[in-house]
Image: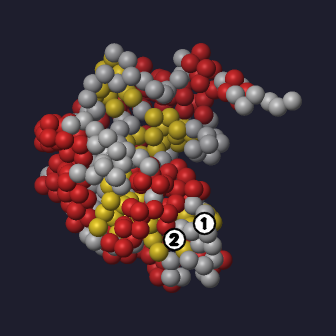
Amino acid sequence: MSIDIFKKCSNFHTAIDLKRLGLYPYFHRVGSEQGPEIILDGEKKVVVCSNNYLGLANHPKVLETSIAAVKKYGTSCTGSRLLNGTNDLHEKVERKFAKFVGKEESILFTTGHHSNLGALSSLVAKGEVFVTDKLNHASIIDGCRLSFGEMVRFKHNDMIDCEKQLIKYQDKSILIVADGIFSMEGDIINFPELSKLSKKYKARVFIDEAHSLGVLGENGKGVGEYFGMEDDIDVLMATASKSLASIGGFIASKTEVVDFIKHNARTMIFTASLPPACVGAIDAALDLVVSEPERRIKLNKISNKMKLAFESMGYDTNCSQSPIIPLTVGSDMVAFKMWKMLFDEGVFASPVVTPAVPDGRAIIRTSYMATHSDDHLNFILEKFRKVGRNLGIID
């Protein structure tokens, strides 16, 4: 007799157990715009878990351009980019993004997740290999799995282990894939060494700039600009859901590579295109990344201040080099308890538990915006000091 396929659903108790304990941290209702303060479940909280790094999600120009796009194009494109869902605004933004990051051409997907799934699954075929960082984002892992190619992973940001994998597969076509800034660890890929290895073993390089676009580099172009090695990135991916104040994802590369992806990526061909309101927001946000560099300068100052302050309290900030600052707190249950205590104190943070992190290495993931004020930051630090001491995480 077969077993009911839904049996695993009835055996899933994690969410129910956390709700029963009053420690459930997910799917809370936001009742306001996404700023450094939000209304959450009817109460005001100071946010320390947003990816709105430059604070552009509420910028008047972004709102104005998004509204104008709706008035001109309506609320939906009603079809896929391949068929009837491409308009001149999509194409304008693609040209603007490609020019910004210094690539010949770009293509705009409906989500960042779709960008990685579509590009990676189409670029690597049977008999070819992905060499990827072990802690790459889930969308990269999913994209590799959807391909007919083989995926091998190297230890996080470990270029010695990366070379070991490249040596094993040097007789095959290889695509090296890595995040620019790692979304949970907050550290930056060692791109200079990665680039050297790619040239040595004649591999191509794919960099996910989801968290680094707008944040790293003199002009916010990401890891390539940060290291002065923009031309060493063969394929660049970036989301619009972080610094670009919208949703969607870009793939930028040489014209022939983009053309191949746009005609082979299933997440492009079989998904409705990004709505005009979202594209309009991206259009304005790209301009603001360039015209308001003071936001990026302030963000970096805030990130440095918070990292030093947390470390002076005794927190382990892992290897953070960015606005993402993870605080290692111990077991999953400690992370859930800490989240709830911070929440009750007026701070909204993100607990990250297994399997996203190793057992016993749960974190409270904090991230910062250029629009955080000194009062916000001091309030956050005060509450983390209080809660950390109460839990025995810090002295």
Residue at coordinates 31% horizontally, 22% vertically from top-left? Answer: 31
The reply to whether residue 185 is visible in this rendering is no
**Numbered disc 2: secondary structure:** strand
Q: Which is nearer the eye, 230 or 350?
A: 230
Q: Circle 1 — which element?
A: loop
Q: Earlier in the sequence, mark 1 or mark 2?
A: 1
Mark 1 touches mark 2? (CB < 8 Å): yes
Check disc 1 and report the residue beneath it: 149
Cα distance in 3D space between marks 1 and 2: 10 Å
Q: Is residue 43 visible?
A: yes
Mark 1 surroundings: few (<14), some (14-19) or many (≥20) residues within 10 A: many
Residue 50: x %, y % from top left: 35, 38
Which of the two residues, 149 or 312, is positioned nearer the viewer here?
149
- Please give left or right for residue 93 compared with residue 199 in the image: left
Indicate the quadrant where residue 205 lies.
bottom left
Residue under pointer 2: 175
- In the depicted structure, whether residue 315 falls above or below residue 137: above
